[in-house]
Amino acid sequence: MTDIDLQGNSGLVLHASVHRPLVTTLGGSSSFTARASIKYAARVHLVGLSSISATPTVSLGVQSPIRYQPASRIVNVSKLVLDQVDFFVTDGKTRAQGVTIGDLNLKLFFNGSQVEWPLVSGSSVQDLQVTAGQVYWTEFLTGFYTIRFFPNVIGFWRILLTYPAHDQAVSLSYDAALPTFVPVSSGIQTSFIKR
């Protein structure tokens, strides 16, 4: 417990992190001002023309980071991959709007080794223009985002996008393989044997 006695025309301004009760006695025309990031129970006994004011800042503690990692997806090598990405503000429900490539960090892995492909704006890039060597970021609707990239080698690809401003990360995994060709039946098959 902290006891503070002020007499006469004295004043007190307190900027502190206090984690225990604060008790203050003011006399005369004293004043007391407190600004703190604290959890406290204040008890004050005011005498005469004294006054007290407090501006508490409530800290809810560390927010849990949002992490998202869907299952790996099988994609065709040398074909455009398009996926949607969701980022939210700290409450975890409100979509983050206007997230640019400068707000994000990208790590791209191929078969467990990091690949240095930059994250670039894809807002004016058509799907046919997407090439290997870059990951394209687009806000296609307010608060809704896509990434596009072109896996040019068979193997396991992983994209890790982090949004440091709101401590969020999205991890997307792709297994790039050759397209599976299924023989196409030409319809009814008949055979005529002449005897």
Image (cartoon, rainbow, N blue to C red):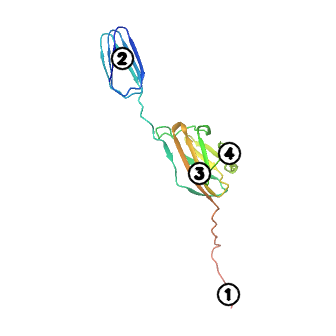
Q: Amino acid at mark 4?
A: Val
- Of the two numbered discs 4 and 1 in the rendering, the one whose residue sits closer to the viewer: 4
In whole angstroms, how far apart are the C-alphas of marks 4 and 2? 61 Å
Category of crowding for the residue at label 3, using alpha-carbon neighbours closer than 10 angstroms: few (below 14), some (14–19), many (at least 20): many
Q: CA distance from mark 3 to mark 2?
A: 57 Å
Q: Secondary structure at mark 3?
A: strand
Q: Is residue 9 above or below residue 169?
A: above
Q: In front: mark 4 or mark 2?
A: 2
User: Alpha-carbon distance for marks 1 and 3?
Assistant: 57 Å
Q: Which sits earlier in the primary sequence, circle 1 or circle 3?
A: 3
SS of the residue under disc 1: loop
Q: Is residue 86 visible?
A: no
Residue on which disc 2 sits: 52
In this figure, what is the number of numbered marks?
Answer: 4
Labels 4 & 2 near each other (Cβ < 8 A) = no
Q: Does the residue at mark 1 contact the one at mark 3 (Cβ under 8 Å)?
A: no
Name the spot of residue 139 as percent of width and height, x first: 59, 42
Quadrant of the drawing holding the C terminus? bottom right
Instruction: Tell me the CA gap for discs 4 and 1.
Output: 59 Å
Which residue is the site of mark 1?
Answer: 193
Q: Which residue is mark 3?
A: 158
The amino acid pointed to by label 2 is Ile
Q: Residues within 10 Å of mark 1 (few under 14, many from 20)?
A: few
- Residue flagged by tag 3: what amino acid is it? Arg
174 or 18, nearer to the observer: 18
Q: Which residue is mark 4?
A: 125
